[in-house]
Image (cartoon, rainbow, N blue to C red):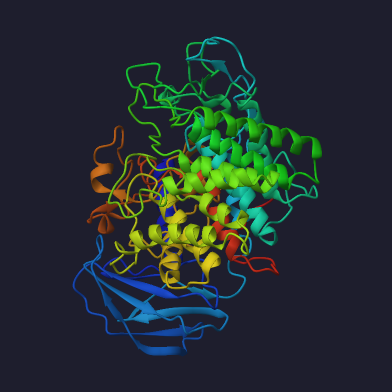
Amino acid sequence: MTIVSIAAGVALASRALAGAPVADSTTFIRVNQVGYIPDAPKVAVVCSLDSTRVDRFVVEDERGRVVLGPKRAASAPAFGPCVTTYRLDFTTLRTVGRYRIVANGVSSPIVRIGAHVYDGAADTLLYYMREQRSGWNPVFGDSVHTRDGIIVDSPRAGQFVPVSGGWADASDYLQYVTTSANATYVMLMAYRDHPWAFADRFNANGTPGANGRADVLDEARHGLEWLVRMFPSDGEMFNQIADDRDHTYFDLPYNDSSDYGWGKGGPRPVYPCTGRPQGLFQNKNSSTGWASTAGKYASAFALASRLFAERDSAFADTLRHKAQAAYALGRAHPGVCQTAPGHSPYYYEEDNWVDDMELGAAELAALTGDRTLLQQAIAYARQEPTTTWMGADTARHYQWYPWHNNGHYETWRVANPRTDDSTRRLMAEYYRRGIEAVVKRADNGFRIGIPFIWCSNDLMTSFATQAMLYREMTGDNRYRPYEQAALDWLLGANPWGVSMVIGYPHDGVWAHDPHSVVAAQLGVDKLTGGLLDGPVYRSIYENLRGIALHHPDAYSRFNTGRMVYHDDLGDYSTNEPIMDGTANLTYLLSALASRSPRVATNVIKMPLRP
């Protein structure tokens, strides 16, 4: 049996265990496979591949007793492959337990309700972050990419700079400050706001063992130390390691054969911020400045300086200085610093930068108490009130990044509620506008309004996060059903019935054949916690280079609509785990953990030693 066929068989077994309907069924009940907090909205979605009518549903406990209903099934518009959809609202069921939803003789997978269903969730994501480490990697028990790197596209071209470390961006081994600085920031933010959600089970180097510090802080520090190396002086800022020459070989990280002109497995190129278009070959990006990268450096360093002040004052002082220096470079060089393409035309086409500078200004204001910085943050906020993809049908690859603007929330936090309530109300209003733009598009059975561009799960995570922050800022609960719907989508309430997080929940349906050489050769468990790219428009999938499924499509019945998803090694557009999306999700899931966590029962069952 080939690796691919084994993976396909395991995936089919997983679907059977999760209570999927028999093969000849055309009606499916999709639920959040992790579960529901008692006071949260609770809606399952019926997806029927034909015109089947559903009038009523009931909820049964584990002994088959009806505990809710019969209740009316609310008809909703078609969506994707679902010719008919129905919303099954069981919000009034708040009793802790395990249930099934039954409609038209079809049963859902197990539905969990409880205050602790998300305990351990955010820590589960950190398994994937550790697997993505460059430098010393605890999953492989070896160091990888230790010879980084050689400067290119600079007056210092050809010189070596020691920048090993950080995280690989996805299943390839490129490394970007664009995504890594944001990942570092959101993990720090998650710990600051929800410290109870994180345990201490691993050392700083990612090996098993408590070290007196939450594991999320260890992971964030791994990112911070790399960012410090990538910003070696106040006037020199690097943005990227490697380019798409990385894709030549399908190798494991520790025997990467890529050749950048210095021999196979040799040093990799390091791209600086230059403020002008970059690309060593026929393809160029459209860079215009430094500020998109500088603002991300500044925000990560400034927040980290506060969080590490008591633990490591010397490191905190370094971070404080670098935060101020990075922000100054952003002020001096406005514009975007995009990632650099190689032979392929694909790169991160970030078009916005004021959101990054707003966040940097707000975090520096919180760090220093300088109210001038707060006014600068407000000025940046006024230039981009809503993140531009919100309400759009499509966008270019990473055109509007980060996917939601944490700067509005941080500006709201820094503004004094007694003397600057107007600023706080303005920041909340900016969030509301973006949420409303997405909600207007969410007129389908799943209540989903994002565009299905590449990395759609990132957008889904950010929409839910922004809606959650807005609810905290205002107490306005009107968008909570849409916030919950986005979370539910990520964890199984989608047409495919797939949790988009590898290995989570352990008894759910999730990708067993992701686009990853690590999964293919070492086992999918090594990617536990990784958030997948997610479904894309069929038009995107069909026009990307180098995509070919390796085995028959297990989800072919559900890939008949406008968007597609494949659990297949050959589909890098929908089934590749992504580092920045995984880190982004830590905030959302940490916010759902109970304040008195206990041992979780629905996280992956793994030994400490990978």
Answer above or below: position of 501 versus 232.
below
Across and down, in percent, residue 498 comes to 41, 59
Horizontal relation, residue 586 to residue 509: left or right: right
Q: Residue at x 34, y 64 (%)?
A: 439
* Pick the front one: 232 or 133: 232
Answer above or below: position of 438 versus 30.
above
Tell which residue pokes out farthest to the front in this image.
Answer: 419
Horizontal relation, residue 269 to residue 135: left or right: left
Q: Residue at x 63, y 60 (%)?
A: 120
Across and down, in percent, residue 72 comes to 32, 86
Across and down, in percent, residue 5 comes to 39, 46
Across and down, in percent, residue 182 comes to 54, 42
- Residue 83 visible somewhere in the drawing: yes
Q: Residue at x 42, y 21 (%)?
A: 276
* Pick the front one: 126 or 346: 346
Answer above or below: position of 558 versus 361.
below
Disc count in the image? 0
The quadrant where residue 285 appears: top left
Horizontal relation, residue 449 to residue 218: left or right: left
Instruction: Name the image quarter holding the N terminus.
Output: top left
Instruction: Name the image quarter holding the C terminus.
Output: top right
- Residue 226 visible somewhere in the drawing: no
Tell which residue pokes out farthest to the left in this image.
Answer: 51
